[in-house]
Amino acid sequence: MKKIFLLTAVLSVLLPTSCQKPQFIETTADRQGLTSLTAIFTFGPYVDQELAKLVIDDDSIDRFVIPIPYYYPSTSDNQTIGYMTSVRVQAELQPNYKLSPALTILDLTEENEFLYTDPHGNSRTIIITGERVKSSECDILSFTLSNPNVSGVVDKAEKTVVLPTKDDVSKATASITVSAHAEVFPDPSKARDYSKPVKYTVTAHDGTTAEYTVMTGDPERIDMGINVDSIEKLFNFDPVSRLGMPDYTAEVAVSLASIEGRLVICLGNGDTPVWIDGLTGDKGGSIKLGEAVAGSITNDESGNMLITNVAQGGDNREAVKLYRTASVNAVPELFYMFENPVDVPIGHKMKVFGDIDKKAVITYTAEGVTGVTTTAKAVYLIVEGGGVKDIKILDLSGVTGGWGPAPVNTATIVPASLSPEQDGWFYDYYEGNVGANDLYLLHYFNGNGKDEVIAEIGNWANNPNCLDSKTFNNSRFMTLFVVSHFPQWGIAPMLYVYDITDPASPVLGFSNEGISWYQKGAAGIASGDVVLAPAKDGYKLYVYYYDHNAQAVGGYVGDCIKR
């Protein structure tokens, strides 16, 4: 009755005015009409991707110059001059503003004339052109001493690098990663006395400079967690055009790991995983696989990567062979082998909480079988003293209807701590029975066996089955990555990072619900992964994600330095 009353009340207000002549409100031209110009590739490996964007603060000028990067990608040596003569340009215009003729494909090496008209009919001629610009970025991205091996803590805001060591650094050499196309002086490969402050000057491609001071010390940390002001995006790009990864139609089960400052990408089909630079996204090479079979990969909290095969269950049960390595250049060693204890496959979704050389929980989410069965189980290994102490099964069949096969319809289950029987688990998956207007639920299964809803994330157009959890700076964190089921309908991938130190009351610390994506043609295989990677020095936490369907790979980093 309440809903009917409210509707009647609204109609009673509207109906008496329905016969009145509407009042005309004149459109004003006081606001800015042209707010941005975007240049888009029309050919080549990056066709339909954004080349450059000009954000316009003042549209009263008569000449608009789109700043074209000198290289694309910015970290490559691929010059953009060959693309400038055929660029699709899109304008962001407020209602009732017009450009004539309509924007199409332009030669940005020329001065292109257009008639710009405001809502009152006032017109003027404007020029749209382009200009290649060199990068002004001049930062130190990473700094590492050799002999002794020490990773410096870089603070780009303060322009400092702190070496947290008490070793003898009086005759040490260094390796430095700087911004793309920048140069550093003096030569870091020459031995220097780092027990005293050392100055380095970084010169950007356009000549801009920045001076960094390198010194020994112990950066002061905040008591717990991440300094949210330090969070920054590392990269986000199309893995197909940039890295040559399979396109959205390929049925692959992507998984990720981070070691040695590199992001390792596994396709889950037995192919050898590849790695990229964890700071820039630059293409690297393939890892050494040895006898390991790469069904999925992940990393622990201390720079170790685990590699597992996919093992069938039931009557066709197979052995799980779990390998470990700490380097992309080292052949993995067998860490543990066991027979799959459940009646469905495991191996496409594996996660690690803790340090496998000390104490850890390794979780295998069970997978349903197409046309046969769903499942609601996980297999987890308890690691103590650097070895597997016990194998257990988590059964959620009493609280959920279960999930289907990998890579799209399976779940990910991650522990809330090193004591999941006490502190519980988080899990999420694509629930096929959810209606178009319903939200997906991020679940927390606590130590008392109670299932609780932590967050409502997305809907039928999203696949929220990518999770990971780790410890960092006296806090526990969990990340959720939501793959897009329908990128062609404007559905973006989404990323969330929670502080789960109190697992019953997670705190959302960071999110991006509009990650840029690069495949907008059709729906494909909505698989992906997300991984957290604490730096070995304990000062930084990295998060990386991969959406195979929408074609986006990227990462963020935050630190715990007190500022």
Image (spheres, rainbow, N blue to C red):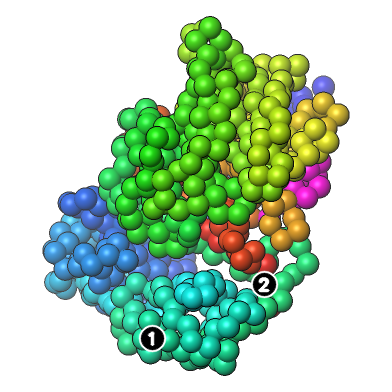
* Camera-nearest residue between 47 and 3: 47
Residue 269 lies in the magenta stretch:
no
Up the image or down, 433 lies above or below 388; here it is above
Q: Which residue is label 1 attached to?
A: 190
Secondary structure under the numbered disc 2 in the rendered image: loop
* Camera-nearest residue between 369 and 87: 369
Q: Which residue is label 2 attached to?
A: 561
Q: Quadrant of the C terminus?
A: bottom right
* Residue at the image point whose x is 56% and y is 57% from the top: 542
Left of 184 or right of it: where is 130?
A: left
- Mark 1 burial class by Cα count in 10 Å: few <14, some 14-19, many 20+: few
Q: Which residues are magenta?
A: 498-509
Q: Quadrant of the N terminus?
A: top right
Q: Amino acid at mark 2?
A: Ile
Up the image or down, 152 lies above or below 11; here it is below
Mark found first going from the N terminus, 1 or 2: 1
- Where does residue 400 sit, x and y in percent of width and height? 70, 20
Q: Amino acid at mark 1?
A: Lys
Please give the label number shown on residue 70: none
- Where does residue 296 sit, x and y in percent of width and height? 47, 35
